[in-house]
Amino acid sequence: MARLYIGELLIQEKLITEDQLEKAILTQKREGGRIGEILIKMGFVQEADVIKIVSKQLNIPYACENSKMLSPATDQGLEKLIPRDFALKNLVLPLSRNLNSLTCAMFDPLDIMLMDNLRKLTRCDVNPVLATRSDIIKAIELFYGRGNMFKDAVRDSYGAMDEVPEESADEITSTLSLDKLIARAEEATVVKLVDLIIRQAIDESASDIHIEPFKDRISLRYRIDGKLYEIPPPARHLLLPIISRIKILSKLDIAEKRLPQDGAFGVKMEDRVIDLRVSCVPTIYGEKVVLRILDRSKVVLDLDRLGFEPKQLEDFRRCINYPYGLVFLTGPTGSGKTTTLYAALNELKNPTKNIVTVEDPVEYKLDSVNQVQIKPEIGLNFASALRSFLRQDPDIMLVGEVRDLETAEICIRSALTGHLVLSTLHTNDAPSAISRLVDIGVQPYLLVPSLVCVVGQRLLRKLCPHCKEAYEPKAQELGGIKLKTSLIYKPKGCPKCNQIGYHGRTVIAEVLVVDDNVRKHMSGEANLLNLKNIAKESGMVTLYESAIKKVEEGITSLQEALSVSMSF
């Protein structure tokens, strides 16, 4: 019997469709690579599912984190047989040794050169066991002890306090010369500590790192899935060297402590590059630093996977495929507006369309899209870039944010002259965007024919699928909320989610399609106040209703839904 290809096996197992396989094959012909990795990258299938299929295809055992097979023997000197750096670089974990036979967990047992190098390095015959990339990395970190490196470095920083003179930390840092400051920032202890702070944040899927000075301590916090969590901080006397080290990496002025500064740098982890945006702000106890982590490999630029309800997605897709008009995304900072816009552009881009964007900053680079970073210091702002865009024969224009009347008017006039314009506004819900535009000076007679859609969105934390608990809520907890199910879920906490109870986030949204009913009420202050009710009459599902549906579906908890949405 002929061996089936992995794509055919995935179809047999009903993990992908034939249409998805055809798309992956076209991508493979265009960009190269293995079909399994392409299917994972496109979001059609999970990595673990592909590894299980490959395991059957090659007749090699499959090891997952829960099976306890990825727990190496501790009494065979395996850590000396395969060094940690080699293990991480090649995604190989030694599991056990029996005479001249070594069992290893591997991500790619078909790599002939790797197998040959392993035999030469260990002088053993290698028996491969298949595992996912993420499971191997976690197991390597646990086995080689890197999980404790950060805790050890923090503890050692307090031990080093004996070397600090009796003067206060503020007095010491204020008298350091620039040369000494650079020298201290480049010390092995500081370099290691900064590296571990960043690495730990990336490992825990944090989006931001906050390093904050107070009178006698440092506060170190990670933002994970939208919430800030305290992390054991290093000693107070290392504040200035740590901040100086971050400034050196970001190419900022380490001597300037009185003014805010912004910078950026990149770090490489395994097979991916992660960007970090740095912001320094002076406070009364020293400089506060926030590092925004942008891991492009974890960003989902697929509208189907963001969390929109089917009807909402259908309405949004219809609007972004109009030949012209104005589409706004609204919500507070960190609500996923930019990701949704990028996902829309990712779907719209094709060789027949000229797409241009003006952003501050350009967060993710898209192929076949012309992206412009604004530079106010030389006069390149949103308005000036937009005026230039109109001479570039664009079909679709993306404006990072509408901040003033001039930018709003150019967007509207562009929409009225045959261009599709996508942008964002900071408002609490979708109907408020219309009021905001009128408030900043946009004339209703221009807004009515140009605006086609407004999407208001938030991000909700998803319950960890491994530990969420079902329960029957009491009437007191519901407070009058009517649910379509008697059982809902609450967080518990497990090793998979670092005892938080939540893992990942999903979108809740309200999609206001500007139809004839909405347009006739878009002039006059009294009508603007009633826009939300008018939009609901036209079929708009509110943020609150969208959040409650996520509770009914077991995606999030009632407490989380109510914390980010309101029923008014």
Image: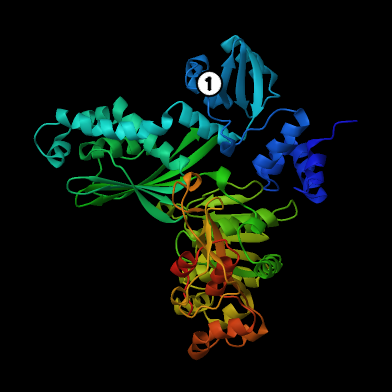
Q: What residue is at 23 percent from the left and 38 percent from the top?
A: 235
Q: What's the residue type where badge 1 is placed?
A: Phe
List x then y, in percent, for residue 501.
Answer: 47, 54
86 left or right, relative to 169: right
Whether residue 41 can be seen here: yes
- Numbered marks: total: 1
Question: Picture coordinates of residue 283 (x, y %)?
Answer: 23, 52
Label 1 neighbourhood size at 10 Å, few (<14), some (14-19), many (20+)?
A: few
Residue shown at 65% from the left, 86% from the top: 517
Q: Note whether 57 is above or below 77 in the view shown.
A: below
User: Where 538 sits versus 333, above or below?
Assistant: below
What is the quadrant of residue 217 in the picture?
top left
Give the residue furthest to the right: 1
Q: Nearer the viewer, residue 501 or 169?
A: 501
- Height in image: 423 above or below 502? below
Q: Position of residue 564 (x, y in %)?
A: 46, 67
> Disc 1 designates what residue?
86
